[in-house]
Image (spheres, rainbow, N blue to C red):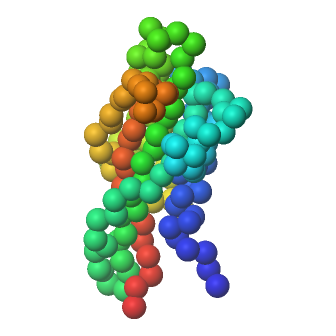
Amino acid sequence: MSQNPLNLVDQVLIDRLSTITPANGYFTDIGTRIHTKWIGALLDVEDLAYPCITIQPDECPPALAGAGVWQFHLGRKVIGLAKPDHPDDCLAQLNDIAADLARCLHVQEGMPNPWGQSGPRKVVLKSISQFQPDHEVPVGTVSIPVQLHVVLPGE
């Protein structure tokens, strides 16, 4: 039995995000700390290192039927978390994270698919949001909803 293409695409997303390190020209090393937990559960981890990424499910618009296949729009929210040592540093850290995530996830229109054969056919980034820490979420966050277009076998 073959692997579910949705699971393969999730792994490709994690693999691509893991390239975010200064050695690859990024501002941060956030790609070395990737999780798939809800933010609340992640914040309960005692020795959580920052900055870090968590990937969460997001909206999946209806799939489109094609000739023997389905184009599935897998919704994921890529969230970068920052916990600065000083409150005045938070915005700068959020900007670094936003720039790194956007650069990593964006594929210029007309370019060959850099995601590989197991990856999505197209990646659509939605609006990027940044949030400063507050009493409910004590860390700064950058949230990027993405749609990963995946071809699924049809009937």
The percent coordinates of residue 88 (x first, y second) are: 44, 8
Residue lying furthest front in this view? 135
- Determine the residue positioned at 28% across, 71% down: 62
Residue lying furthest bottom in this view? 155
Residue 52 is at least partly visible in this image = yes
- Determine the residue positioned at 34% across, 63% down: 60
Closer-to-camera residue (93/31): 93
Q: Is residue 81 above or below residue 154?
A: above
The percent coordinates of residue 153 (x first, y second) are: 44, 81
Q: In which image quadrant can residue 49 be found?
A: top right
Q: In which image quadrant can residue 125 be found?
A: top left
Closer-to-camera residue (17/115): 17
- Determine the residue positioned at 29% across, 80% down: 65
Q: Quadrant of the N terminus?
A: bottom right
- Determine the residue positioned at 58% across, 37% down: 43
Residue 25 is at least partly visible in this image = no
Q: Quadrant of the C terminus?
A: bottom left
Closer-to-camera residue (136/17): 136
Residue 38 in the figure: left or right of residue 91: right
Residue 95 in the figure: left or right of residue 41: left
Residue 154 in the figure: left or right of residue 37: left
Tally the numbered discs.
0
Q: In which image quadrant can residue 30 be found?
A: top right
The percent coordinates of residue 59 (x first, y second) are: 34, 59
Residue lying furthest right in this view? 47
